Amino acid sequence: MDVTTVVVVLVATSISYLQFRAQYLNELQLIRDRLEERGLNLDYHLKIVTNRVEALRSQAESYLVVNGNPPLLASPYNQLQQVPGQNRFAMDQLRLPLTADQVGNLTGVGSLQNRSPEFNLELNMALNLNPSFQVTKQLVPGLTWTYYISNNQFMNRYPWIPSDQVRFLPQLYSQEFYTATLAQQNPERKVVWTDVQADSAGKGLIVTAAAPVYLTKTFKGAVAVDLSLEEFNPYVKELDNRQGSLFLANAQGQLLAHPSLVRSSGPLQQPVGDALPDALRSQENQILQHPSMQMQEMGGYLLIHQSLTNAPWKLVFWIPKAAITMDLVSERMVGSLALLLGLIGIVAFMQWLTRREFIRPAEQLLQHIERESQIRPDSPKNSEFSKPEIPNWIAQGWLPWFETISHTFADNRRLLQELQQREQRLKQQISQLKIEIDQGKRSREFNEITETDYFRQLEQKAEMIRRKMKDISNDE
Amino acid sequence: MSEHTNHSMPKIVSLHSYRGGTGKSNATANIASTIAQQGQRVGIIDSDIQSPGIHVLFGFDERRIEHSLNDYLWGRCAITEAAYDVTSILGETRAADCGLYLVPASVKVSDISRVIRERYDVDRLHEGFQDLIKTLRLDYLFIDTHPGLNEETLLSLTISDVVVIVLRPDQQDFQGTAVTVDVARRLKVPNLLLLINKVLPDYDFNDLCQQAVNTYESPVAGILPLSEDMIRLASGGIFSLAYPDHLLSQVYRQIARQIAAAPPL
């Protein structure tokens, strides 16, 4: 693999990683956004409930204050009757204009006769809550019951139900929806939410929002709204299409909603741990104590929860980290991976093509040049009848180069051979150099010169000059 | 004390060739310079009046030639007035009493034409030789002759103590040299030496030398190989002075020794 391929792979991989990282972070943000949206919707639902509880309490307390002088039982909703043969009263026999939709069944222990004005006032107040009960039933989806329970041993429960099925019993005073409103536990008189309870009328698992009712400083009773746990399940449906899980838990570590674990007909105590992956069950507290809406990573899982505003509950979501990764790779990174593979493929193809069309022929050409250069002029391969050794296969367009090289080398070898032959001939001539004298010509020319009068005179003149020079020399 | 004072007679040395282009002038300049450098007083006369050129080797500016050999031959000046001291070309390392003088021939076209047309007085030339030897106290007088066998040249040979015949390894030269050697013997030249020039290095020098000795019955003073260095110098100076350690310079010194050893006329 050459440098170009490595660089392309590195760049493409880096880009893919950055893209993956951006999409991964985007996924986390999407989870946050979806969880926040679920939380807001659920909080809105709970807000309606707490608002209705507040409204009921306000109405009750206002009634008690405004109607200070206790009147007779003159309420239009009053169709109370003493239950025959029993020391209790109820509103089992409804007569027009009252219908079961308009009123709850006010049931109590004791006699209606000779009761104190305060008792009668409270009884009227409870009857007058009926219109508000209707409104509450309409406003709060999933409402099972809404009621007022008095510390004077009666309660008005809406919707109406015969007293032989459900009625006031003193044991109710020991239940959380009542005890949690007492001054000792709720001095601030706020709306409280109970743990998961089984509905006494058999409507399954419920939670109750309740608030105390006071006449000035005197605790009179409590107003409450019961909600079926089934009502919360829509809020914990799949947050996305992957392996994650969303559930609702209260501060006591009870599951309030879960796509599969919580049914209104299910067991009363469903611990939060059951909704967590096995690896995280022992870390329940650590998970729930983490700051709200902050993603935490634990044991290969991503976890996030949102604390609700209108109830001490938390929406918790977890998902295996690998699920997000795999999802991104399989769904969103396929394009990038295909691009990456495509790029690598193109580079590899170009490399192959370049090697096939250029590098390999160039190497062959070099080898061809090397081969041609090694053919000696006197080699049989240098014969004009021998064909140049051109490879069987060469890339298109390269053949003329091979032929040109072969022709050029062949020409050079021919010239070299001629030069060598010429040099050889010259060397032979040189080695054979002989001083050859044409003696006849020599003699003839010599005679032509020396047999002239001129030469004879020259000889005489030379003799004379020599003599003269000798004389001069002798004189000196 | 210079060596020339030991000689009873100065030597006249003629370098001659049957044909032109044998490197005769070059050999004359180099041998004369070699001898002068050894402390001798040497004169050179360019008697190749019809095609003068030896002055070029000495870097002699033709405009400096106030009097030439031609002027002397035509009675315009004394021979010594046509002699120019070129001793300085021998360089700083020359011996103390040495001297080198050059009598150039005129390069003027009109003078050359006149020589060809009218020829010149050979006797006067020889008298000039003697004057020059005497006046400049020369130990050696080198005569660069005109090639061939004309009257003037032949007479120069007769008065020479040493005649060096320059030839190339060429059949025409071989043939012409044979005639020249025969004529020189007839003229009783006392010392006849052969100098074979421009010999291709591929030749067998010993064989060539032996053949020449056998053919001409004369000693071979030296064989000069054809040298790229000499060609490269292109007559731009005296080769043996420019490259004293070169093979050619060694051959020139060998020739100079043989000339010095030759007995006088």
Image (cartoon, coloured by chain):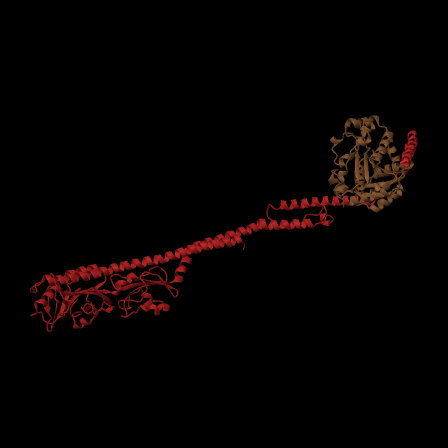
Chain colours: A red, B brown
Q: Position of residue A249 (x, y in %)?
A: 29, 65
Residue at far front of view: B1
- Left or right position of A91 against B106: left
Figure quadrant of residue A426: top right
- Residue at the spot 33% in from the left edge and 66% down from the top edge: A287
Looking at the rendering, which quadrant does residue A278 occupy?
bottom left
A458 is higher (above) or lower (below) than A248: above
Q: Quadrant of the C terminus of chain A?
A: top right
- Measured as percent of width and height from the top left, residue B61 is found at 74, 33
Where is residue A117? Give x, y as percent.
7, 67
Q: Nearer the viewer, residue A197 or B17?
A: B17
Placement of A425 over or under A271, stated as above or below: above
Left or right: residue B125 versus residue A343 is: right
Left or right of B121, for residue A89: left
Instruction: Please say whether residue A291 is visible from this viewpoint.
Output: yes
- Count of residue discs: 0
- Residue A441 visible from this viewpoint: no
Assign the N terminus of chain A to one quadrant of the image. Answer: bottom right
Looking at the image, which is closer to me, A286 or B249? B249
| Depicted B21 relative to depicted A220: above or below | above
Residue B253 in percent (x, y) is at 81, 44
> Which one is in front, A167 or B44?
B44
> Can you tell which quarter of the image residue A129 is in?
bottom left
